[in-house]
Amino acid sequence: MKSVMPITALIALLGASSAMAANLTIPMAFEYLALDGKKIESSVFNHKSDISLENGTHKIAIRYHDMIQDDFSDSESFIKSSPFIVTLAVDGDHDYQLMPAEGEVIKRPKTFAKAPQIVITRTDGGNVNYKVAQTDIKEDSFVSKLFGGNDGKDIEVAAAAATSTGVAVAANAHTPAATPTSSVEAATLPATLPANASDADHAQQMLQYWWLHADDKTRKEFMSWAIQQL
C-alpha cells in the first residue's frame, strides 16, 4: 500500500523549507554593527556572534574589537578598528564562518586594527562569494561621546548608512581595499545621566570599569575634563 503524505504535513514542510536561512558566525573579537542598512544591537556585555541571512546579497558592517595587554605595563585596554563592510552573496542554507586571515590568534592587534584582514568560509567547504571594504568611519572618543551632548557620532548609524542599498564602497573580492588611517578608540559609555541612587551606583561602576579598560589617551582626556569640573 502506497504511503501518502497528508496535505497539512506537506504544507508544514514547505513552510519550514522556505523559512530556512543561512548563518554567519564571527569570533568574540569582532562585533556586528549593521546589516543591510539597519543597526544590530550588541555590546561587550551581550556579544552577538550569529546572524541569519536570507538568500540574496547582503552588506554587513563589522569591526574588530578586542581587549589587549599593554606593552609596558600589566594593564589592559580596548582596541577597536573602523568598521569594514562585508558584501556576501548567500545562495542557500549554508553556515558561514568569518575568521582573521592570519588565523585564530592575532599576533599584532594594533596593526590588525588598522585594516582587519579576514576570510569567510563555509562549513561544507563550498565556494563563498564575498567582498570586503575598509572604511575610515571613526567613533568619537570616550570624553566627547560622554559630555558632547547629542553631537557625537553614532558609529552604528554611520555603519547602517554604509550598508544601505545603493551605497558605493570600493573593494576587491576577498581582499580589503586601501588601508585607511588607524582608528583605535576606547570603549564608550551611554550619554545618559543617572536618575536615582541605584542608577548613580551603576554609573559609578561603569566608570570604574571603563577607566580600568581605557587606553592612556582616553584616560588623559577624561582627567583633563574632570579637573576642569573642580
Image (tube, grey):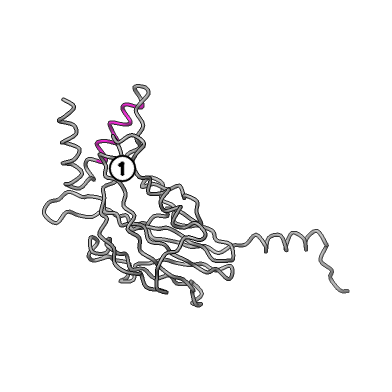
Is residue 207 covered in magenta? yes
- The amino acid type, in three-letter code, at marker 1 is Thr
- Relative image position of residue 65 (x, y in whole percent): 32, 55
Above or below — where is 124 with respect to 14? below
In the rendered structure, which segment of residues is drawn in magenta? 199-210
- Relative image position of residue 176 (x, y in whole percent): 35, 69
| Crowd band around label 1 with a 10 angstrom C-alpha radius: few (<14), some (14–19), many (20+) | some
Quarter of the N terminus within the rendering: bottom right
- Residue matched to label 1: 188
| Residue situated in front as seen by the camera: 80 or 200 | 80
User: Toward which corner of the image does residue 169 lie, by quadrant?
Assistant: bottom left
Give me the residue at 36% from left, 68% from top. Answer: 118
- Relative image position of residue 214 (x, y in whole percent): 22, 45
- Relative image position of residue 95 (x, y in whole percent): 51, 67
Give me the residue at 20% from left, 44% from top. Answer: 218
User: Toward which corner of the image does residue 222 lie, by quadrant?
Assistant: top left
